[in-house]
Amino acid sequence: MPKKLYGGIEAGGTKFVCVVAGGPSHIVDEVRYMTTTPEETLGRAIQFFQPFVASGQVSAIGVGSFGPVDLNPESATYGFITATPKPGWSHTNVLGVLQSALKVKIAFDSDVDVAGLGEYKWGASQGCDPSLYLTIGTGIGGGYIKDGRSLMGLLSPEMGHIRIPHSRELDPFRGSCPFHGDCFEGLASGPAIEKRLGVSGAVVPEHDAFWDIETEYIASALMNYILTLSPKKIIMGGGVMQREFLFPKVRRRVRELLNGYVSSKSISDNIDSYILPPGLGNQSGSLGAIALAMQIDEISSDPGI
Amino acid sequence: MPKKLYGGIEAGGTKFVCVVAGGPSHIVDEVRYMTTTPEETLGRAIQFFQPFVASGQVSAIGVGSFGPVDLNPESATYGFITATPKPGWSHTNVLGVLQSALKVKIAFDSDVDVAGLGEYKWGASQGCDPSLYLTIGTGIGGGYIKDGRSLMGLLSPEMGHIRIPHSRELDPFRGSCPFHGDCFEGLASGPAIEKRLGVSGAVVPEHDAFWDIETEYIASALMNYILTLSPKKIIMGGGVMQREFLFPKVRRRVRELLNGYVSSKSISDNIDSYILPPGLGNQSGSLGAIALAMQIDEISSDPGI
């Protein structure tokens, strides 16, 4: 019997990745293209999936989208990208457009939730429940996976915007978040680094003193997430975390800040395998979308809507 | 048919409350006494429950204990109060002592988790899932209720110890936490207030400027919990929150700090019913222990162990 196939869309603000797969070792087809207008971008996704849907090979698709997204199933704008600054995309009904064209089951979640799901299913946090996926890039966001699903409460978490200590003596930068100034994202995201230093973090030398400041913010936020969410693994992706030297610095500082208070060997003895880069590399998002499609397929055993 | 009865123990560092009840409106017996030695204190609990157990009226007991407690079922010291500064109680096998004397199903959790469960089952956060119970008193702790149960991850959360902004200009106090100095608990707990001001917070006048500082810490922490855990209600108990004027101050400041970022009417329009005192008053803990006993009774349908 041929292995069952699923569709996945990593709907990024810069590029879209569409994939048909049965899992990480069984990728049947994949397409990557730049994010332009909603019509063109979603149109290409529809075109890509259409033959797989028509032949009955794919009956469930997962979408991990850039945000802000409306993830409340009771909301009138569920499945929309809402008030994004990205030109043309504000209030785009991503889920509705895909659903009405493809007429299969479609599950919709945020990019970071979906990446967390991918890492939990097949990556560096495999089987670790609860686990946390954090991205530090253009923005900062976290996907918390509990009982195999992304956390949804009053809303989807927006943990990149937490308040953390900020010494204006050491770092006079006022923060770049239009809502909160010097929240975690306002202090430590890629744009915050560039606004502060005048250059991209990608070209700041490893031994620049700035990285101690960045480390302090990341470690403070991780400490807060550990104390609040108690994840069994923390996976860190995003552009800023491409600077791999940050991992040992952050791990050391997290342990110092916790100061023995959380008595777990995962932190005291094994922090090198507690705070990790993504195991799926740059495929956390697209494979996570496949994992999400598998979930909706399990939940609903109805034939395609 | 008579209503089924359960046992509940609120095992506090100052006093113990033992109760036999079928729910908040059906309390059959209750005893309150000071916490002395483990032998005497647990002995009185055993004595209280023995007749109810012997007659078969009670076959499940819930315990909400002061901490630190070991809540990891795989640990050798599961059900212990671990390294507490309370004289005589360090490394006390609370669960084991009760279990071997009473020979019924006993569920063990932290005081704050259990209070959160009581509020979720019958109190101010009834049916709100996920919800958060926060206590600000001798210590600061939070119980997060998700899918009807307290969150257990790598360990039980210790969210009272998160890092928050601390302006040493406005508040030169260095913090009272022996592990982290000026973490949330180190800045805002009852002992932190007393150490800073030289008097108990209970006697600091309502219009003292200190309460603006206290409000800033509480609101910063709540903002972080909201962004990370996305609870549908936040219940705040503990000695410091007995000063009722703090509620409107904290609500106002939380809304200011979030600055419209979390687009939920619960916060923008109805924050007065989003951040609330306990609906069960000083019974959150003892009734929560009853709710916990009901849970273990549902899970395991075995006859008493």
Image (cartoon, coloured by chain):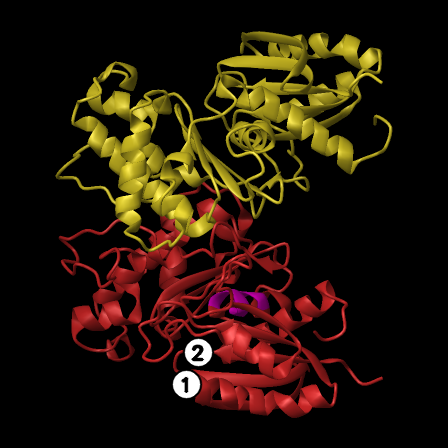
Chain colours: A yellow, B red
Residue A170 sits in quarter: top left
Q: Is residue A6 left or right of residue B286?
A: right
Circle 2 SS class: loop
Residue B250 sits in quarter: bottom left
Residue at horizontal 39 percent and vertical 24 percent from the top: A137
- Label number found at residue B12: 2
Residue B232 sits in quarter: bottom right
Residue at image mark 1: B35
Mark 1 is on which residue type?
A: Thr
Determine if the magenta segment contains residue B115. Answer: yes
Quarter that holds the C terminus of chain A: top right
The magenta segment: B112-117
Helix, strand or loop for the magenta stretch, by majority: helix
* Residue B284 can be seen in this image: no
Instruction: Check whether the beta carbons of the residues at disc 2 and disc 1 lie within 8 A of each other.
Output: yes
Circle 1 SS class: loop
- Label number found at residue A262: none
